[in-house]
Amino acid sequence: MIRLAVGATLMAVAAYIGIGIDKFYKMRVDYLKDFADFLGYASREAGFLKTDILRIISLYCASRSSNLTKYLQQTKQQLESGNAPTIDCVFLAKKDKKLYESFFEGLKSADYRTQEKLFLHSIAETSELIKEAEKNKKNKGELIRKLMALGGVALMVIVL
Amino acid sequence: MLKDLLGGELYNAIVSVCPEQGLTEIRLRLGLPVAVRVGLNRKVLPFIATKKMIDGVVARATGFSLYSRQDEIKQGFIHYSGGIRIGVAGKGIAEGGSLVGFSEIDSLNIRLPHEIKGCSDRLSNIINNFENTLIVSPPFAGKTTLIRDMARALAKNYDVVIVDERGEIGGGEGSIYDLGSFVDIVGNVPKTLVTEGIIRSMSPEIIVLDELSPEKDMKIVEEISRSGIKLLASVHSDSIERLTKALPHIARHFCYGVLLSNKPSIGSIKSIVRFRGD
């Protein structure tokens, strides 16, 4: 009986870890997709209405419920304080953060022509990062989840 | 508002020497002492304008988005909320015969507006039976303050549309000016682009234009006159005689010319001229 309980616990823990790791990769995809959504929105606001970035962030956060909302509002505060925009999100890879930070930094001094190019570049780069993140989600996240589930079953068998 | 624009450090440094209420102008020149005007009097402050200071003001004025104010910067200014106008100077970039921007902004001239309600009461005879009026004024003589108050007074009896090219009359977002309930403002666009639309669709009884450029804006003055809409406008000059000699056709469209002066004080009326008898 005790062995059964221990085995089941180990199996559950292993499965839980696997689900957690899978979710980690999934969250990166979600955050990047939210950033792409923000870029699309910002690009239209900036390109057509010439709205400044502080107002764009306020409007976006008011109109959307997004994973990125908290970080965008932090970025707005950083800009208003004259600090360099940074993002500290555990789900984003180093290159994701670099793209995010360099976008806002570049926008500060971009004129009307270079802001168009900056948006195009950022949207294209984000699209590539999303593809990479989805590939990682499929190849690593799902694989690890399945392996951990199997591993959990194996541990249970060993214990029993 | 001024503190938001300047940033806490610069703002505190300035108001520790000059209280905000009296300030009319702040000048930041790279590498040179910061200077302010209190009324007409210039004061030089004991600290230097740095690149970080100037870039910080520009960044805050443009909402950290230079592209959003590109068109204004091409005309040499940035408008900020509350009617603050920031003149910019530096290393210009020309393309195709026009200024497209500045690669370096080295100087800022921050003009702070003031509302003086009732300053147009002296012109009540003109306001009560309003005919086209041209306010002639050198810089720093209070023409925008006067035009704002005249628009407010005229709006009690007329539907007034203000073409607020630089956002100074109405003040824009965050404005504290009370222009009354019968004023429409078209802001932050060149007069030449919007006047025709205003005439056609806003049914104005009076149009207010600030800082006419006689070369560029005469066509819209003629169009407004032809449309039977009354006009209140201002132009830079220190003499009505000199203005009408240089531009004899300008007087044709106006009934009255009001010459302002900053002596003995800002907003002094030096003379009122009747251009035509109708």
Image: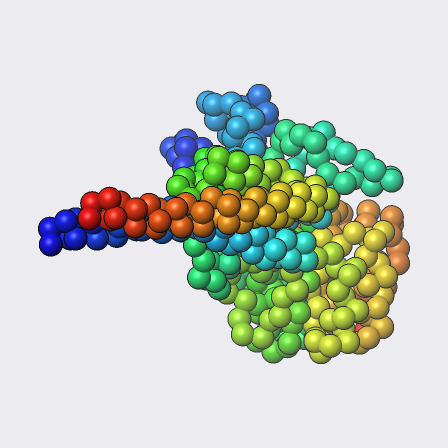
Residue displayed at 58% across by 75% down: B182
Task: Name the spot of residue B162 as percent of width and height, x first.
Answer: 66, 65
Q: Between B108 and A69, which is closer to the camera in this rendering?
A: A69
Residue displayed at 64% across by 76% down: B159
The answer, for residue A160, to whether it is visible in the render is yes
Res B105 → quadrant: top right
Answer above or below: position of A38 versus A89. below
Q: Going by the image, does A38 lie left or right of B189?
A: left
Q: Between B89 and B58, which is closer to the camera in this rendering?
A: B58
Residue displayed at 66% across by 64% down: B186
Answer above or below: position of B121 versus A97. below
Task: Name the spot of residue B66 as percent of width and height, x first.
Answer: 63, 43
Answer above or below: position of B59 versus A1. above
Q: Going by the image, does A98 lie left or right of A112?
A: left
Answer above or below: position of B14 versus A117. above
Residue displayed at 75% across by 59% down: B191
Task: Name the spot of residue B187 as percent of width and height, x first.
Answer: 65, 60
Q: Going by the image, does A97 lie left or right of A11?
A: right
The answer, for residue B141, to whether it is visible in the render is no
Which quadrant: the C terminus of chain B?
bottom right
